[in-house]
Image: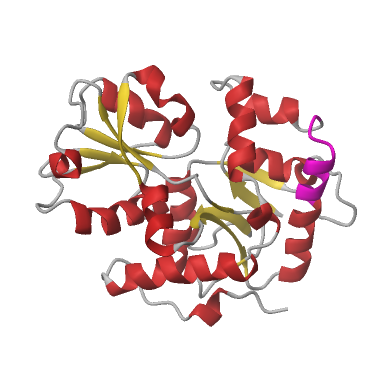
Amino acid sequence: MKIVFSPCPNDTFIFHAWVHGLIPGAPKLDVTYADIDITNSLAAGVNGPEVLKISYAALPWVLSEYALLPCGGALGRGCGPLVLTPDRTGGANGPAALAGRRVAVPGERSTAYLLFQLWTARHVPESVGEIVVLPFNEIMPAVRDGLVDAGLVIHEARFTYPSYGLTLLADLGRWWEAETGLPLPLGAIIARRSLDLPAVASWIQASLAYAWAHPEASREYVLSRAQELAPEVVEAHIKLYVNEYTMDLGETGYEAVATLLSRAAREGLVPEVNPAALRTSP
């Protein structure tokens, strides 16, 4: 079975047991590791992989071919994308300082960018300038080096941005939670509708259960894919992004996804999605 997910610690932690043949009855996996902007493109293409991780923002475009699985993704609190500026700017003018500026983002169909668009519509009176798409690991160096005026960062950047001399302008996850009271949907696991979807979901849940029961078993694998991260950053990353919603979205998780996509659809940012279409049929 072909599967694509990122080399980030939360994904490798979740899928370690399945990747290494530790889940009884689960098929062998053919794994590709890719940045989220690439996985979003793969899902939208012809003959994409059977299972993959994408941004929730990309979900409306692929629901005809893929189903959202209720597990394995990234959805939670205190884990939203950050808007960073060079320390020399000081962020003295707040969000208004972004008007007309060059901002690096991790993908035009990333959840981070979707949330950024919803946030700037309310907080930046004049529109932001040029949007520059970069792999997420290149954004902080680009801001530090003055190649862009600000950066929208995800993943472990929330733990490491001070080492780049950058300043936090806005925590979009905190803004989202204050606006809605809901956790923030970031990354989704989807599978082709032709598959046995309950079985695929059960293998992912079994892999996660194994990871939680044997946290040291995946350590070498996780660190090998996150070579630039210190072990303590890897551990913090996993604790933040792997949570109760990773095992099962539940009603609160589905409500969060539906709320994000409905707000985005009202702004004309994504196609409208019937909330019922988010549920995986048994």
**In the foreground, 200 or 277:** 277
Residue at 33%, 72% in the rendered image = 265
Query: In this view of the protein, can residue 67 be seen by the observer?
Result: no
From what the image shows, is residue 135 above or below residue 140?
A: below
Range of residues picked out in magenta:
207-216
Residue lying at 34% horizontally and 56% vertically, measured from the top left = 114
Instruction: Locate residue 132, reporting x and y percent.
Output: 25, 41
**Residue 128 image point, x, y percent:** 15, 47
Q: Residue at x 50, y 59 (%)?
A: 43
Q: Position of residue 71 (x, y in %)?
A: 67, 59
Considering the image in quadrants, where does the C terminus appear?
A: bottom right
Q: Main secondary structure of the magenta part?
A: helix
- Viewer-proximal residue among 160 and 52: 160
Q: Is residue 206 left or right of residue 235?
A: right
Please tell me whether residue 163 is drawn above or below residue 155 in the rendered image: above
Q: Is residue 29 visible?
A: yes
Query: What's the colour scheme?
Result: secondary structure
Q: Is 187 above or below relative to 165?
A: below
Residue 62 is inside the magenta segment: no
Q: From the viewer's perspective, tell me whether residue 160 is left or right of residue 172.
A: right
Quick check: is 211 in the magenta stretch?
A: yes
Callout count: 0
Q: Is residue 24 left or right of residue 260?
A: right
